[in-house]
Every structure is written in structure tokens, then in C-alpha cells.
Image (cartoon, rainbow, N blue to C red):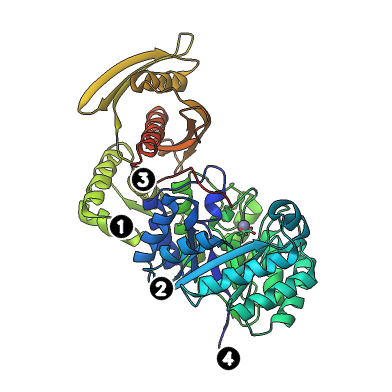
């Protein structure tokens, strides 16, 4: 019997990017899209084309390079949005436009200020217009979770007649319980039949996004919208890795059902996304958290050693996690490094490989064992293509034990080396103040995070900062990587500064002046 395939629609690049602090530049989005394709995602929601020129460009670039997965562009039910969406996916081999309008009484009354019949009319016009660009049109009833069943049926009936091929039922505010979600999807599945594919899109405000998605699959949904690491607006969306592994592990419940996901690519994809966004899954996060396959207690360790299935329902290898793989060392050459990068799923230009290789050599001099995660972190750092207006040359720090913390920093700017020094409330504050003095631009630090990329005293530190450089301007993110946390902090701050300047000059690809959904 042929498998009943549950389509996986990944919205990491759209809803996921709506996570606070998760904005990505064009290059980063392209790398993630290529990895999502490798993971076997059926549909990649590449962005919201009308939101900003940066979003449009990212979707266009992804359309050029992704040829197996469907590339989807989001649009409100507005002519200008749909036009932008249609144009952004023009070069994609498989194209989809996803248009939506709110259907709950509260959204229609207060947000849209529209009568229900006007909403239906707008939805029908939107689907018909989207059909002039592509046959594959998805329609979403925003806030379906709080919409009336009779109205949902009425609007869905009309958009099917207008040509919608996928009907998405979002629980936009994460309000539903699994039993309610299951009942709603069962009734809608009966109503829609085979006229279109039923999809769900669940948010995690009550921690039920995955449970609601799985309940919907059991009730007849054949597309699940989700994100890597569960990123997304507010508490996030259903986590792709959890939905997929639940369907795989519980074959007794999801009889004959399957996904097209190559689960061995789950861990590499999760790592790529966390390296790029700087948002690391909580350690106890299911499937991809640092502790997901760690057995701490002696009883558990003993049990697993005697028979793996005593305490494990799936194997680390199933998600592509090889915990102990030491990959390269100080003597590894460029050839081995390049091969490793390819094995890890990156496609870098020769120039990018050379730069990453130089950083690898620097690291290999200081660090005995280099793991896949180190290489992933190095490459993620390399693909942040922001013009290096300022570049860190060297730094000298004064011990703050009992004294006044101070930093002397030398930065290259337009081929000139500029050195300055400042004192601060701590060493990191002193570094950031010195950089401010050199650039003449004062930054306000909004967030500072440091994570060890791997284990051990010689682990690489990855620092992510969020800085506002001008009041009323949106915050920008910066990433820095080094075995030395202070150096990683300085690099992160300078990368935020460069990112801010590239946006200001219109050089960069990130455009925070987004039209919001
Ligand atoms: O949560 C939501 O309703 C959405 C729609 C745009 C599908 O993200
Ligand atoms: Zn959403």
C-alpha cells in the first residue's frame, strides 16, 4: 500500500523570522533554504515579499537555487501583496502563493473593520488574482482557531471555487486544545473532502502547538506548517523536528502515514538555524536540545548500555547527531576542510572557503579537537555577508580585579588603523565604549548572550548582541566567534555596527523597516 504522505510546510524563514531577534540576511536565508531542501521539506515559505525589499530579494534568490521543494511567498489578501509575491517566485521551479485574511469575529471587527461578507469577497478576489501567477494557491483563515465553524465553511467553499488548492487552518494565537483542534479539522475534512488539501498552522502560546498539529493530522490534515526549533511569533510555531519524529516513532498511531523528511538532516538543520539566528534551543528541548539524548542518572546509563531501548525511543543517529565525532585537527588540509563543509551541506564559493579555512587554521592552533559543531559555527560566521566597514585588529584589556576595567582597541577603518581606549563598568562595557568612541556612534546594548559551541575548556564562544545605534531605529543583531569570550564579544559588537551601517547606507540585505502582518 502506498504511503499517506503528510506534507511538511516549513515557515522558519517567514513566521520563524518573526521571532524577536531572529532576523536573517539574504545570504543566511539562502543557506537555510538549501538545507531545508536537503532535509526534504515539501514547501518552503521563503518570506513575505511585500514586507520589505530585503524579503523580496531573499525569496527571489531562493527561487533561483531551490529546485526540489516548492517555494512559497506569503501575501495578505491585497493586490499589491499578491503581485509582489507572484513576482518574487517567478524563477522558482515549483511555485506557491499563500494568501490570507482573518476570519474570527474579533479580528474582522477590530483589526480589519470589515463585515464577514466583505471578507469573503476579498478572499475570493485574492485567490483569483493569485491564480493568475501560479496554479498552486494556498488560502489561510487567520485566527481560524477562534472563528465560527459556519463562517469557516462558507469562506472555504468560496475560495475552493475560486481555485485554492490548499486550505490552511491556523490556530494563530495558540488557543485551541488538541481535542478541539481534532474535532474542528475532522468536521472541516468532511466538508472539504478531496476538493483541496487541508493544512494546519499551530502556535505555541499554551505549549500545545505540536500536540494540536498531530491531533489535526489524525483528523485528516495532510499538510503541517512548522518551523525549525519551533521558532516563530511570540511562543513560536509547532517544531518541525517534533512533529516529524512523532509521526516516525509512533507508527502504531500514525499508521501508514509518513513524511518526506530525511530525519538524519534534522540536527544539522537545527544547528544551522541556531548558529545563524543566535537563538539556541533550550537544553531540555525535545529532539534537538543539548540534553535530548543525554542520560545523566546511573540507572539510565546502565540501562541504555545493556539495551538501548530501555530508556531511548529513538536514536541520536536518527536525527543525524553523532555526539563524539572529532572531525578535523591542526594537520587537516584545505581539501579535507572543503570536503567537510560539503558533507555538512554548505555550498560556499572558493573565496568563502578560503576565508573559513583561514579561521579554521587559527582555531586549530588553539583547540585540540575540532567538532562538526565548531565547523558549523565557523561557516555560519562566514556567510554573514555584511560589508566590513570596521574590522577588529587587536585589543588589550586591563584586569578588573580590584582595579578599573579598561580596554584599548585597534580597529581598521578605510585602510587606517585607529586606536582608542575607555574605561567601563566591566571589561565588556569598556570594550563596547571604546568601539563607540572610535566609530563616533553610540550603541545601546539591548541583549547579550554567550554560548559555548561545544564542550570543554577550549570550546569556541559564540556571542550574540542586540544593539540600538540610534534612538527610534530598530535594534540590530551582531554575532562573534572566538575561543576568547572577550574577543567574541568585540567581534559581535562590531558586526552589529557593520550591520547597522550597511542598512543605513542601503548596502545591507537586512531591512528591518518591514511592513508587518
Ligand atoms: O499565524 C498565522 O495565522 C499566520 C498566517 C499568516 C498563516 O502566520
Ligand atoms: Zn503564524
Q: Which residue is mark 2?
A: 68
* Helix, strand or loop under label 3: loop
* Helix, strand or loop under label 4: loop
The residue sitting at 62% across, 83% down in the picture is 256
| Numbered tag placed on residue 384 in the rendering | 3
Viewer-nearest of labels 1 and 3? Answer: 3
The residue sitting at 38% across, 48% down in the picture is 380
Q: Which residue is mark 4?
A: 1
Q: Quadrant of ligand 1?
A: bottom right
Counting residues from the start of the chain, the first of labels 1 and 3 encountered is 1
> Within 10 angstroms of label 1, few (less than 14), some, or many (20 or more) residues?
some
Evaluate if marks 1 and 3 touch, with contact meaning CB atoms under 8 Å apart. no
Counting residues from the start of the chain, the first of labels 3 and 4 encountered is 4
Q: Which residue is mark 1?
A: 340
The image position of residue 69, as x and y in percent, is 44, 71
Viewer-nearest of labels 3 and 4? Answer: 3
- Say whether residue 156 is left or right of residue 452: right
Does the image show residue 347?
Answer: yes
Viewer-nearest of labels 4 and 1? Answer: 4
The residues tagged by marks 3 and 4 sit, at their Cα atoms, a distance apart of: 46 Å
Amino acid at each position: 500500500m502506498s504511503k499517506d504522505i503528510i506534507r511538511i510546510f516549513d515557515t522558519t524563514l517567514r513566521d520563524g523570522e518573526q521571532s524577536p531577534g531572529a532576523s536573517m540576511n539574504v545570504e543566511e536565508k539562502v543557506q537555510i533554504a538549501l538545507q531545508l531542501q536537503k532535509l526534504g521539506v515539501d514547501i518552503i515559505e521563503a518570506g513575505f515579499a511585500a514586507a520589505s525589499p530585503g524579503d523580496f530579494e531573499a525569496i527571489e534568490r531562493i527561487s533561483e537555487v531551490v529546485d526540489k521543494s516548492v517555494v512559497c511567498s506569503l501575501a495578505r489578501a491585497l493586490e499589491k501583496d499578491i503581485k509582489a509575491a507572484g513576482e518574487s517566485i517567478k524563477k522558482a521551479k515549483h511555485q506557491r502563493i499563500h494568501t490570507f485574511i482573518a476570519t474570527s469575529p474579533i479580528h474582522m471587527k477590530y483589526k480589519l473593520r470589515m463585515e464577514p461578507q466583505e471578507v469573503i469577497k476579498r478572499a475570493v478576489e485574492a485567490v483569483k488574482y493569485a491564480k493568475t501567477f501560479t496554479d498552486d494557491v494556498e488560502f489561510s483563515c487567520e485566527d481560524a482557531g477562534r472563528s465560527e465553524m459556519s463562517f469557516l465553511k462558507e469562506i472555504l467553499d468560496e475560495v475552493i471555487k475560486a481555485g485554492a488548492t490548499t486550505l490552511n487552518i491556523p490556530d494563530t494565537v495558540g488557543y485551541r486544545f488538541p481535542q478541539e483542534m481534532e474535532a474542528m479539522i475532522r468536521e472541516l475534512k468532511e466538508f472539504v473532502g478531496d476538493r483541496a488539501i487541508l493544512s494546519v498552522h499551530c502556535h505555541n502560546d499554551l505549549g500545545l502547538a505540536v500536540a494540536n498539529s498531530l491531533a489535526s493530522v489524525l483528523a485528516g490534515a495532510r499538510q503541517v506548517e512548522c518551523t525549525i526549533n519551533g521558532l516563530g511569533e511570540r511562543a513560536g510555531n509547532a517544531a518541525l523536528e517534533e512533529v516529524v519524529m512523532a509521526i516516525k516513532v509512533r507508527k502504531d498511531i500514525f499508521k501508514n502515514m509518513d513524511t518526506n523528511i530525511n530525519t538524519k538532516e534534522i540536527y544539522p538543520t537545527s544547528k544551522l538555524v541556531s548558529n545563524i539566528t543566535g537563538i539556541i534551543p533550550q537544553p531540555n528541548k525535545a529532539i534537538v536540545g543539548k540534553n535530548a539524548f543525554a542520560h545523566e542518572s546511573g540507572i539510565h546509563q546502565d540501562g541504555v548500555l545493556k539495551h538501548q531501548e530501555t530508556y531511548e525511543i529513538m536514536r541520536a543517529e536518527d536525527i543525524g547527531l553523532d555526539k563524539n565525532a572529532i572531525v578535523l585537527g591542526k594537520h587537516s588540509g584545505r581539501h579535507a576542510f572543503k570536503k567537510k563543509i560539503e558533507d555538512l551541506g554548505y555550498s560556499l564559493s572558493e573565496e568563502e572557503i578560503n576565508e573559513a579555512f583561514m579561521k579554521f587554521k587559527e582555531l586549530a592552533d588553539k583547540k585540540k579537537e575540532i567538532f562538526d559543531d565548531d565547523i558549523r559555527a565557523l561557516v555560519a560566521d562566514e556567510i554573514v555577508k555584511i560589508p566590513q566597514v570596521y574590522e577588529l585588529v587587536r585589543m588589550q584589556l586591563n584586569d578588573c580585579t580590584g582595579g578599573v576595567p579598561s580596554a584599548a582597541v585597534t580597529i581598521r577603518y578605510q585602510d587606517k588603523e585607529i586606536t582608542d581606549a575607555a574605561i567601563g563598568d566591566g571589561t565588556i562595557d569598556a570594550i563596547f565604549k571604546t568601539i563607540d568612541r572610535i566609530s563616533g556612534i553610540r550603541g545601546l546594548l539591548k541583549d547579550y548572550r554567550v554560548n559555548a559551541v561545544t564542550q570543554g575548556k577550549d570550546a569556541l564562544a559564540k556571542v550574540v548582541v542586540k544593539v540600538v545605534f540610534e534612538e527610534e531605529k530598530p535594534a540590530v543583531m551582531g554575532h562573534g566567534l572566538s575561543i576568547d569570550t572577550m574577543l567574541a564579544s568585540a567581534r559581535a559588537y562590531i558586526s552589529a555596527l557593520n550591520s547597522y551601517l550597511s542598512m543605513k547606507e542601503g548596502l545591507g540585505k537586512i531591512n528591518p523597516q518591514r511592513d508587518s502582518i
